[in-house]
Amino acid sequence: MGITSDLKVLYHMTMKPIRGRSHADRLESFYAGQADAYDSFRRRLLRGREELWRQIPVPANGVWVDMGGGTGSNLEYLGDQIAELSKAYVVDLSPSLLEVAARRAQENGWSQVSTVEADATTFRPAEGAADVVTFSYSLTMIPDWFAAIDNALAMLKPGGVIAVVDFYVSRKHPADGHRKHRWPTRTFWPTWFANDNVFPSADHVPYLHRHFDPSHFEEQRAKVPYLPFVRTPYYAFVGKKRQATE
Ligand SMILES: C[S@@+](CC[C@H](N)C(=O)[O-])C[C@H]1O[C@@H](n2cnc3c(N)ncnc32)[C@H](O)[C@@H]1O
């Protein structure tokens, strides 16, 4: 994948109008023409995914739900450990990306991986509960992201793990110990990403901390391909669902 593939992705990200009456239609309008070139470009744009995936404990016989899992590329970070899972779901609303995920699962012989065209705010695994729920750069694209986190919380077993990596901006007055972004950062990135229906939020981080016991949290900045002088902020969060209290 080279410059031609990058140009195709850049065209879809910067110039091609996104059409559609529903959220699912708009996603497919955005992704259909770039699905095959997706992984190569996003490897350089969506940072922190591999580091995050590698620190999530893989539960023996567990159920893992990757919400907005797209092409399923993150599952490769599990390496041989993927065989420990009894089931992994790649849940997404874009059939074009799911087609790539299904091909990947077949080529790798991941018989326990299913691709599901469904909304992250409502999907539930057939097993009834999940051990791990992940969101990799998908929360910023889910309009009702509160509902997506609430849904993850509801389906996780007590002690189950949620892991999220995504773009964000800080609140003007963040919690103690959290990074504070200045006005230009808080203003520029939401405006820039909105063109692609990506909405970096100041509220993901507080909401995740409120509802889960954090075991890992970091705030970073990443280079953006072809924009040498800017760094976009992203966070990575791993937390556990609290045990029920009586
Ligand atoms: C930036 S991509 C990230 C894909 C993948 N997780 C990755 O790390 O490469 C965001 C994904 O979220 C999906 N998405 C957005 N809203 C969704 C929703 N409500 N339900 C399920 N998937 C959704 C998009 O179709 C897209 O595949």
Image: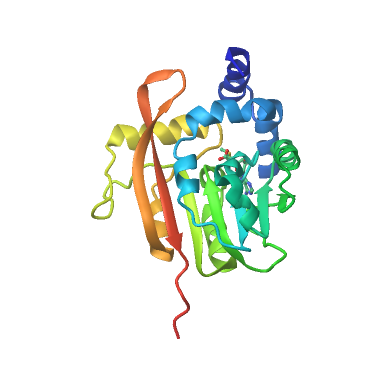
Say above or below: 203 vs 29: below
Residue at the extreme left of the image, as rendered = 176
Decide if residue 117 is in sight here. Answer: no
Disc tally is: 0
Q: Quadrant of the C terminus?
A: bottom left
Quadrant of ligand 1: it is top right
Give the residue drawn at x 62%, y 24%: 12
Question: With respect to residue 209, does 203 lie above or below?
Answer: above
Which residue corresponds to the image point at 38% horizontal and 47% vertical from the top-left? 202
| Left or right of 240 in this view: 197 | right
Q: Position of residue 44 (x, y in %)?
A: 49, 28
What's the image's color scheme?
Answer: rainbow
In this rendering, position of residue 244 left or right of residue 148? left
Res. 22 image quadrant? top right
Where the N terminus falls, by quadrant? Answer: top right
The residue most toward the bottom is 246
Nearest to the observer: residue 110 or residue 90: 110
Q: Residue furthest top?
A: 3
> Quick check: 166 left or right of 59?
left
Residue 46 visible from this viewpoint: yes
Q: Residue at x 68, y 58 (%)?
A: 87
Residue 155 figure quarter: bottom right
> Nearest the camera: 110 or 184?
110
Where is 88 relative to 221, above or below?
below
Position in image of residue 227 (x %, y %)? 42, 19
Q: Position of residue 190 (x, y in %)?
A: 43, 36
Please name whichever residue, 5 or 148, is drawn nearer the observer in this view of the structure. 5
Percent of width and height locating residue 171: 32, 47
Q: Residue at x 67, y 69 (%)?
A: 128
